[in-house]
Image (tube, grey):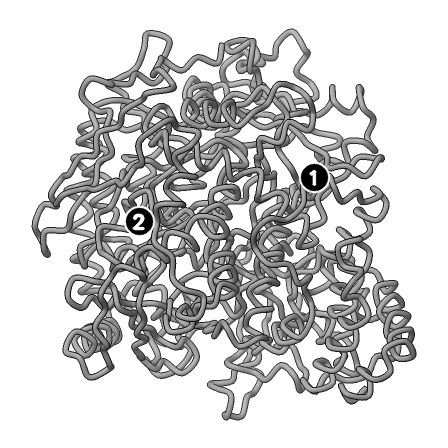
Amino acid sequence: MKVTLHIWRQKGPNHVGRMVRYEHNKVKPHMSFLEMLDVLNEELVAKGEEPVAFDHDCREGICGACGFMINGVAHGPERGTTVCQLHMRHFSDGNVLYLEPWRAKAFPVVKDLVVDRSALDRIIASGGFISVPTGNAPDGNAILVPKKNADLAMDAAACIGCGACVAACPNAAASLFTGAKIAHLGLLPQGQPERYQRVLNMLAAVKQELFGSCANIGECEAVCPKNIKLEVIARMNRDFLRASWTQREDALHNGN
Amino acid sequence: MELKSRIPSGPIEHRWDRHRFEMKLVNPANKRKYNIIVVGSGLAGASASASMAELGYNVKCFCFQDSPRRAHSIAAQGGINAAKNYQNDGDSIYRLFYDTVKGGDFRARESNVYRLAQISLNIIDQCVAQGVPFAREYGGTLANRSFGGAQVSRTFYARGQTGQQLLLGAYQALLRQAGAGKVAMFPRTEMLDLIVIDGKARGIVTRNLITGKTQSHLADAVVLGTGGYGNVFYLSTNAKGSNCTAIWRAYKHGAAFGNPCFTQIHPTCIPVTGDYQSKLTLMSESLRNDGRIWVPKKTGDTRPPNQIPEIERDYYLERKYPSFGNLVPRDVASRNAKAVCDEGRGAGSELGVYLDFADAIKRLGKQHIRERYGNLFDMYERITGENPYEVPMRIYPAIHYTMGGLWVDYNLMTTIPGLYAIGEANFSDHGANRLGASALMQGLADGYFILPYTIGDYLASAKLETVDATHNAVRDAESCVTRQTNRLLEIRGRRTVTSFHRELGKLLWDECGMARNESGLKTALQSIPELREQFWNNVNVLGSGDELNQALENAGRMADFLEFGELMCLDALHRKESCGGHFREEFQTPEGEALRDDANFSYVAAWEYAGPGETPALNKEPLTFEYVRPIQRSYK
């Protein structure tokens, strides 16, 4: 198989980037997309050219490190799939593919296809947890969780923090990511005591990190490799609305 | 070197409690005066950082990934063991202890394993309180499933993403402390050397992977939670970035390395498909609960599986091990898969065996199977293009976990005072073979419940001088790191780092993989130094050292794998017995099972660095079994 790649090359955060064209004729249908890039990189090194930098680690779709745009779609054409789990059998001989990094003000480009997603960690640090110290927690079965809630919480908790939702959103909003954590913790009895404070804190952090506003367009859901549902945003908005009246003092204090 | 294991005496069930009482405490108001460095943010590193920060220590946590949430613990699928006995099926702390010691083929310390089994109960409670969405029954109670090497159902799980959910719990606890200013996070930062002053671990030298800046960080204690060394084999189920650099640099500073040849081959991975393949993907062992493993009875049978009638199939695990069947421990399952493939009876006559769900689907329905394993089936289909609801999966063993690691005492301290190793980075609890769902248990036990206590004992009694960055040892370590970086960039040879990695990996898989023998190991011991020599003369690392340079990162890790691989083979050669994951072809029973030699090898091999080009010194920590009598493991 042969493909033509146009890849965003940018030497560093303060350099100007550009698209560079590569002809790749050693593609095999069983390769993963990243293995296809590995082969390209080996050839580049042999020619004395610097390899293309891209983030990746587990290569089994769970660590959330990989991700870039393929022809304008985050993680490429297959639904519910990270780019490391996307195989070349989904493309055809002669395809022309444009690879670009995630584009969002909150995700500055580090190099080539690598971006800085530390803003997502800061959102979690602002409240995406249950404040429980290590030590004598009550017996696991002392807290009963209806199976349905546990399943819904798990659906939301499956988020891998890859940032595709932000990259796909025309406003570069982080609502699917933030909503997923708020839904996960808010659906469980353990998450109730901090439920409303959590949403206020996390949304204040989102604003500070220069993510855009959510307009419920749904591009995020379409590209999410873990099929996180748009309803997590509805849960987040409902909690935020309620928090805004019941905890108005805190809300004002946090600048929301 | 004297190995002081510091194992408490007395009845095993009271040892940990007594030890905790006897350890010195650091006054709450004094804790904030101590700085602790934690390298790695997986289950062990994140849980240790969060717990120690909560106690009041100042913690600096380092990881090479762009976020602590991406550590490879995230990829663990199946579950975590705990002796809760929620299923009323006769489980107990003692039984979990017994299963783990036996599963480890009697090469682990009884006291450590007993403590692990005790703590398993607290881990589940802690994780539930944190909001880990474990699977539930309709009544709201926690659900369990069974796993290899056990006859009770004690594994807790969150679909096929248990590692992810446990790690996110620890990560959230970690970031909560980061938000509170008690933990300073250093993502995209790699530890490249250890700083030892007056014989004590006092800091690390790191490279910022974005700017390339070399920097030293000083502290009162250093904790390594940097995972295992499975990637020495190139193709493994580890993440691409997983490496042995931190533990290897510690070894070269005097930390003994325990049992490096104890590596685990996981029986259920997706087989290799091409020479461009970059990693192997695990299919959770939990699949063996409902899947039946078989191969054709005839050799060279290339018919598609659906055309092979029942009578011509060999369900070899069920046939050979009627009481454990498909749930035999990992080493046994792996070796048997290799054996049938070597006979020429592999699936489609290639390297692989069938894992068939047809019976389970008939019995329980497709929906039920989808609920249990849906994400695993999806993953399999994405990678192979085959639908496992319709055709049996094809699986083959792959390197997955390393039981060996830095030697640690009962307090998890290495032979360098002030240097701790936790999780997969240490050698402690799994002996020669780890049971399924025990890695998560050990990582979290070390991080949440053991290290936070034991480190206080050291800090309270060690007399630590104040040191600063002008100390000679600091400057030496820094310049050593800079020298190596420059050297790698100056070679500009003809081969890529990956090509060397593939070559080393293949050599080790062939000679020190699922089965080992004396002549193969000797070949490897001869070839590795040659390959290392070639590497240092002919590797090509482009770019510079003061920018993001992934080839440079890999080259540094590769340089360490090329040294470590030799130690692994040396250990495998010296251990003239078969046990757990270490199978020496010369030592097997007539039925082809591993044949231990308790009279001569019932010890931990702790290797001590003796300088470049020198043969490392072998120290032995004898293993005594007071509770579980070593027997020939039988799963028949």
Residue A122 point in image, percent of width and height: 62, 76
Amino acid type of disc 2?
A: Glu
Kindly identify which chain the residue marked by label 1 belongs to.
B
Classify 10 Å Cα crowding around label 2: few (below 14), some (14-19), many (20 and above). some
Lateral position of residue B435 relative to residue B385, left or right: left
Q: Name the residue under label 2.
A: B503
Kindly identify which chain the residue marked by label 2 belongs to.
B
Residue B594 sits above or below residue B547 on the image: above
Comparing labels 1 and 2, the label whose residue is closer to the camera: 1
| Front-most of residues B605 and B91 | B91
Mark on residue B377?
Answer: 1
Q: What residue do we see at 79% from left, 68% from top?
A: A179
| Front-most of residues B444 and A3 | B444
Residue B473 point in image, percent of width and height: 16, 74
Q: What residue do we see at 20% from left, 47% from top?
A: B528
Q: Name the element at disc 2.
A: helix
Mark on residue B244?
Answer: none
Lateral position of residue B534 relative to residue B59, left or right: left
User: Nearer the N terminus, badge 1 or badge 2?
Assistant: 1
Q: Name the element at disc 1.
A: helix
Q: What residue do we see at 27% from left, 51% from top?
A: B414
